[in-house]
């Protein structure tokens, strides 16, 4: 059974940093592209970014490009999302997810077959 479990969420000040983790189990982690998605309560989900199976390629939404970094650790079966210089607009529940299809040209996910339960990231002074 595929399981994804996020952790590390919490309160961060604007301009600070926060690293979210997602531990994967039930599948061969290093064989899969992985992605992060966020959602503000009451609003739709917003794609954040994606990382290739070997960690060598990433792509980000324009809203976070240059501020957020996705990485992964093959040995720990863990996916990371580092929020640098976040603003209050970045407050959301953050989900890690496993795409089952993605656009080969844009490297954007097209469909997702597994989701974690999410972890909250709150940016506030």
Image: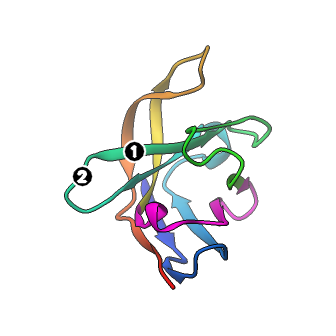
**Residue 74 location, quadrant:** bottom right
Picture layout, residue 32 above or below residue 23: above
Q: Position of residue 103 (x, y in %)?
A: 53, 18
Picture layout, residue 53 above or below residue 87: above
Crowding at dot 2, Cα within 10 Å, few <14 / some 14-19 / many 20+, comes out as few
The residue depicted at 75 percent of the width and 43 percent of the height is 55
**Residue 39 location, quadrant:** bottom left
Q: Which residue position is annotated with label 2?
A: 43
The region drawn magenta spans: 72-93
Left or right relative to 1: residue 96? right
Q: Nearer the viewer, residue 21 or 28?
A: 21
Left or right relative to 22: residue 40? left
The residue depicted at 48 percent of the width and 80 percent of the height is 124
Q: Is residue 1 visible?
A: no
Q: Nearer the viewer, residue 87 or 8?
A: 87
Residue 46: which disc?
A: 1
Give the distance between the C-alpha atoms of the residues marked 2 and 1, in whole angstroms: 9 Å
The residue depicted at 45 percent of the width and 48 percent of the height is 97
Picture layout, residue 3 above or below residue 8: above
- Residue 3 drawn in magenta: no
Q: Position of residue 12 (x, y in %)?
A: 56, 81
Dot 2: element: loop
Dot 1: element: strand
The residue depicted at 55 percent of the width and 64 percent of the height is 22
Q: Position of residue 10 (x, y in %)?
A: 49, 82
For the residues bearing labels 2 and 1, Cβ distance under 8 angstroms: yes
Residue 105: which disc?
A: none
Q: Is residue 68 visible?
A: yes
Q: Position of residue 52 (x, y in %)?
A: 68, 36
Q: For the view shown, which residue lies furthest in the right direction?
A: 56
């Amino acid at each position: 059974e595929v399981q994804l479990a996020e952790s590390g969420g919490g309160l961060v000040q604007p301009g600070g940093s926060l690293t979210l983790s997602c531990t994967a189990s039930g599948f061969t982690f290093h064989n899969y592209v992985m992605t992060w998605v966020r959602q503000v309560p009451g609003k739709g989900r917003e794609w954040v970014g994606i990382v290739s199976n070997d960690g060598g390629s990433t792509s980000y939404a324009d809203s976070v490009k240059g501020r957020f970094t996705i990485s992964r650790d093959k040995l720990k079966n863990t996916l990371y999302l580092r929020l640098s210089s976040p603003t209050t607009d970045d407050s959301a529940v953050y989900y890690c997810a496993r795409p089952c299809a993605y656009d080969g040209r844009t490297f954007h996910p097209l469909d997702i077959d597994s989701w974690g339960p999410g972890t909250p990231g709150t940016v506030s002074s």
